[in-house]
Image: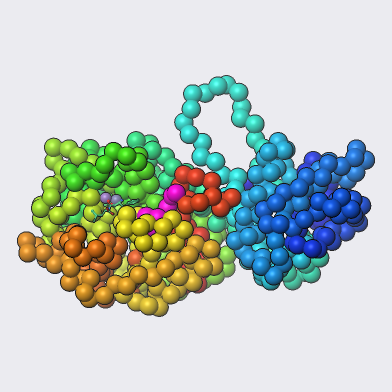
Amino acid sequence: MKIRRVPAAAASRGEAVFCFVVNGRPPQLGAPLAAVVAAAEASGDLQGKFREVTVFRQPAKAACKRFVVVGLGDADAVDTEKLRRAAAVAQASAAELGVPTFSLLVTAAALGKVAAADAGQAIAEGLGLGAYKYAPPRRPTGKPAKVVAASCQLAVVGLGKRDEVAFGRGVAAGEIAAAATVFARDLENQPSNLCTPTALARAAKRLAGGPLRVKVLDRRQMAKLSMGALLGVARGSSEPPQLIVLEYRVPGAKGNVCVVGKGLTFDTGGISIKPAGKMDEMRYDMCGAGAVLGLFHALRHGGLQGHKPRCNLIGLIAATENTIGPSAQKPGDVVTAMDGHTIEVLNTDAEGRLVLADAICYGKKFFQPKQIVDLATLTGAVVTALGHEVAGIMGNDQKVIDAVIAAGKAADEPLWQLPLWDCHKEQMKSAFADLANINGPQHGNGSTAGGAFLSFFVGDTPWAHLDIAGTAYGSRSRDYYKGGAVGTAVRTLLHWARAL
Ligand code: BES
Ligand code: MN
Ligand code: ZN
C-alpha cells in the first residue's frame, strides 16, 4: 500500500473519493465536494453506521466519479480500532470497485476523541494491513496480476496545523508498523518446506545494516555452547537448526533488553506426535519469531521515530523443526540446557519451552539483559483459557508485564495476565532430572506450566512471557486481518520498544 498525503482539494477528485462519517453529522469537506455531500445527504442514505459503506455515483461533470462514505458509528465511541477497521473497509471497497488508486478524506469530526497522531497511525495501519494478501506459489499464467486499490491519497480536513502535523507523523508510524506486520505475516503464512529455519535466518540477515547486526549460530556452535535443550528438539529433523541473533544498537544506550521468539517452523509434536487433523496449522509455530523479526524490520525502517530507548534491543530466535526421525528424542530422555539445568523430556510436544530455555540462557550469558520479553505459540491451553482475541502474559516482574500490557492496549492487541506463582514452579520438578518439561495432567494449568518452566532459566532477570498460541492465527475477521497468520504482537512490540 502506497499512501500519499495530499491537500484536501487534490483528494476530492478522481475515480473514488472515500470519506469517513460519524452518526448524525454530514461531513464538512469544503467547496469542491459541497454539492456532492448535499446531494448525498438529501438522498437520505448518508448514514454513519460502523463499517457501512454507501457508494454515491456522480454525474459526468462532478469532481469525482464516485463518492463513498464509510460509517464510524457514534463520534463519542470512535477509537483507534474502529479507525483501523474503517480504513481497511475503505481499502476493500476500493478494491471491489476495481480502481488502482483511491482518495480518503478524514475530517476532524471523524476522529472523535482520538488524538491526531494515534488516528493517523491507526488509519495507515488499517490501509496497509487491509491491502495484505498472501501470494501463494502458483503456476505462472503469463498474465500480470491486476493491481487494485494499492495506492491511497490521504487528506485531512479541518484539523488545524498542529494536529495535521501530528496526524502525518502518525501516518508515517502506521506505515512502518504495517510494513513490519506484513513482513511477519509473509514469513508466517509460508508452509514449513519453504519457511525453514534456514529461510528464517536468511530473512533475518537481509535486515542487517545500519545499527542492526545479525548473526546466526549453527548446530556446531550451539553444541559448543552446550545447548542440549534446543539441540534435543532439533535431533529429529534433517533441517539444520538456527539460533538467530539480532543486535540493534542505540547510541548512548546503557545495557540491553532481549526479545526472544519461538521459531518452530513446524511442530509435529515429535515422538509424542500430534493428531493429524489441523496439523498443517503448526506451520504457525514460528509466530513468536515472526513477531521478533517484524519488530526488527520496523526498527530497521525507522520505527523508533525519534524515540530513544535507554537500552540496545537484542532479538533472539530459536529456529528449528520438531519432527520425527531415527535420532529424534524420546519421552523420558534427559537433556542438559546451556546453564546446566537437566531436563526430563516427558513429552516431546512441549518443545517450545526447551528451545526458548537455551535462547534465554544465551541472552543472559552474552548480553546480561536488564529485561527479557519472550513470545511463543507455547500452549493449546492458552487458547482454551483466552481464545483467539486475547494473548496470555505472565512473568516475574510486574513493571515489565505492565509495560507490555500497556503497549498491547495502545496497539489494540489485548493481553491478559495469568498467575505464575511458586506453586506452579513446584510442579515442574522431576525425579529423574532438575526439571520436567511438563507438569502432570492432575494439575490442569497448561499455560502457566510453560511459563513456570521458563522462569527457571530466566532467574531473577525482570521478565515477561507472552503466550500467543491463540492470537497468532484463527481470530475473527477484523477487516485488517482476513485469515491465515495475523502477524500478531509486532505492533505491540513496537509500541513497547518506543517506550523503553
Ligand atoms: N505449538 C504447540 C502449542 C500450540 C497449540 C500452538 C495450538 C498453537 C495452537 C506447543 O508446542 C505444544 O504442542 N504444546 C503442548 C504442550 C503440552 C504437551 C504440555 C500443548 O499445548 O498441547
Ligand atoms: Mn509442541
Ligand atoms: Zn510448538
Q: Residue at x 17, y 66 (%)?
A: 428
Q: How is the image coloured?
A: rainbow
Question: Residue 348: x, y in percent?
Answer: 19, 50
Magenta span contains residue 471: yes
Question: Toward the viewer: 388 or 428?
Answer: 388
Q: Is residue 160 magenta?
A: no
Q: Which span is picked out in magenta?
A: 467-474
Which residue is more in the foreground, 296 or 374?
Answer: 374
At x 14% / y 67%, what residue is drawn?
A: 429
Q: Nearer the viewer, residue 50 or 31?
A: 50
Left or right, 4 with reference to 187: right
Is 368 situated left or right of 9 in this image? Answer: left
Seen from the viewer's position, the closer of residues 66 and 139 is 66
In the image: residue 36, left or right of residue 359: right
Q: From the viewer's perspective, is 302 left or right of 460?
A: right
Q: How many marks?
A: 0
- Is residue 155 in view from this perspective? no
Residue 469: image x %, image y %?
Answer: 37, 55
Residue at 17 percent across and 38 percent down: it is 325
Residue drawn 48% across the image and 34% down it: 136
Per the picture, the main secondary structure of the magenta-coloured stretch is: loop
Q: In the image as oriented, which residue stretches furthest toward the left?
A: 432
Let me know if residue 343 appears in the view.
yes
